Image (cartoon, rainbow, N blue to C red):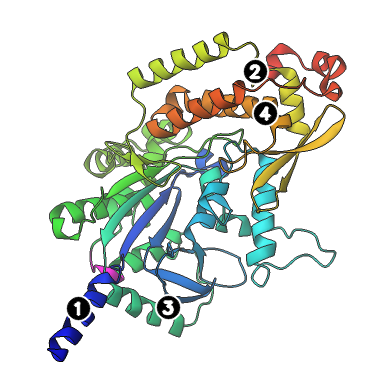
Amino acid sequence: MRLWKLVAILLFCVCSIPRARADATLFLGEPYGYDGALAGTGHASVYLSGVCAASPVVLRLCAPGETGIVLSRYRGIGGYDWIAIPLIPYLYAVEKQEDIPLFVDAKLLAFLRDRYRRDRLESLVPDLPDGGTPGGVWYELIGASYIRTIYAFEIKTSPEQDAALIRKLNNRPNRQRWTLITANCADFARGVIDFYHPHAVHRSIVADLGVTTPKQLARTLSSYTRRHPELRTSRPSSYAIPQVPGTVPRSRPAHTVTECALTAKKYMLPLFALHPYIAGALVAGYVGHGRFNLSRNALILDSQQQLDAPLTRMDRRAVQDRFEELLRTESWAAAADDPRWLFLHAAAEPALDASGGPTLKVRLGGEVTPVGIARANILSVPEGFEFAAGLVQARLREELKPAAARKTARADVASDLVLLQQLLAWQPKELASTAGSATASALSPQRAAQ
């Protein structure tokens, strides 16, 4: 009897241990800036749910409750080949999900990145001798979802494979190897995915002229999981992580090499005129390999880290009607395109509250007031509700643009409408006199609309 009791207790303990989640997810970040205008191939990294970081360059297995790391190859950061960043900071440059700001501009983005660098990455990216922020491309390590939409392609792995990858990467020299053609970020991601599932992804001679690109990895991994349904995870194997609304320029669709040429008239017109056979080969390559649609049937990761359907055209029209009706029926509304609000937002300085949540220091009524700008703290300062309402309006206007609506979760829009209604329900104070008539008159209606 004692033996059976002991066996029962042990069995209960084993069954009570939460099952370790282990999967590898290819992150394909859309291009932005010069990459979006010129090459347009984007960035590749790998999210490992069962692997965590003892430091940005030393890996370990995750403890219960940890969310894993994003692993990628970078150029010119501390002389390292790869660097590991926890998931939430990689996407949003904050430690906690509830601290993700609702609306982002370049000033806030720079502040959040530098704050995280000083707190967590000082050994990797140290301050300048005068204590200032260093230059370089270290900013690519954190806050990726402020500058681009990311498409995720998931495949099942095992804790044993995670442990083997940790041993491999920890034991070999981590020295910079980046080259554009043969050892770029997509080559590193290909190596990680192939470590878990050999030959699951590969480069393409036809679509990419032998260069590994993020979109080619996504296409081949999607094809591999369709052929091996036992490797699919419990949730949909592909989804989109939308770019956070704000004034930061929107990212552009990712392309293969042949698509880059075909979509750029400055490349294709001379090719058709001077080398029609080469141009024809590019078209054939695109028809055969380049028509993979990243967003087709993709669910959207919402602010609660749940997958939800994107807004349809009918959804967008219904939300737009409800949004406009809400603003009409309230006795006041701080319009997000009001010159006074635009001035206050541009002049506001980013800061953190006592719990580490992001705020904006706004001059209201002659005093500087910290206004929360994340879901966790936006309702904490009644004096700033009018400004906060303008912020939520600005977010909704961005979400309801036709191009953005296809990458916006329905649950987030519904949550934003509720939040706006809460803010509008409070009797506000007047906007600060510092943003009064002199400043408002200096801003033309056309500039305000921009």
Mark nearer the viewer, 1 or 3: 1
Q: Which amino acid does label 2 sit on?
A: Ala
Q: Work out how far the residue at label 1 is from the one at label 2, CA to CA, in angstroms.
A: 61 Å
Residue under pointer 4: 385
Q: Work out how far the residue at label 4 is from the one at label 1, CA to CA, in angstroms.
A: 54 Å
**In this image, 352 relative to 208: left or right?**
right
Q: What residue type is labelled 1?
A: Leu
Rendering coords of residue 353 (x, y %) = 70, 49
Question: Is residue 69 shown above or below 37?
Answer: below
Q: In the rendered structure, which disc, 1 or 3, sits on the residue that comes first in sequence?
A: 1
From the image, which quarter does the C terminus lie in? top right
Q: What stretch is highlighted in magenta?
A: 195-199
Q: Residue at x 68, y 48 (%)?
A: 110
Question: Is residue 71 shown above or below 425?
Answer: below
Mark nearer the viewer, 3 or 2: 2
Residue 326 visible in image = yes
Instruction: Please tell me whether the stretch drawn in magenta is mainly helix, strand or loop.
Output: loop
Foreground pick, 249 / 426: 426
Residue under pointer 2: 335
Question: Is residue 144 shown above or below 268?
Answer: below
Q: Work out how far the residue at label 1 is from the one at label 3, CA to CA, in angstroms.
A: 35 Å
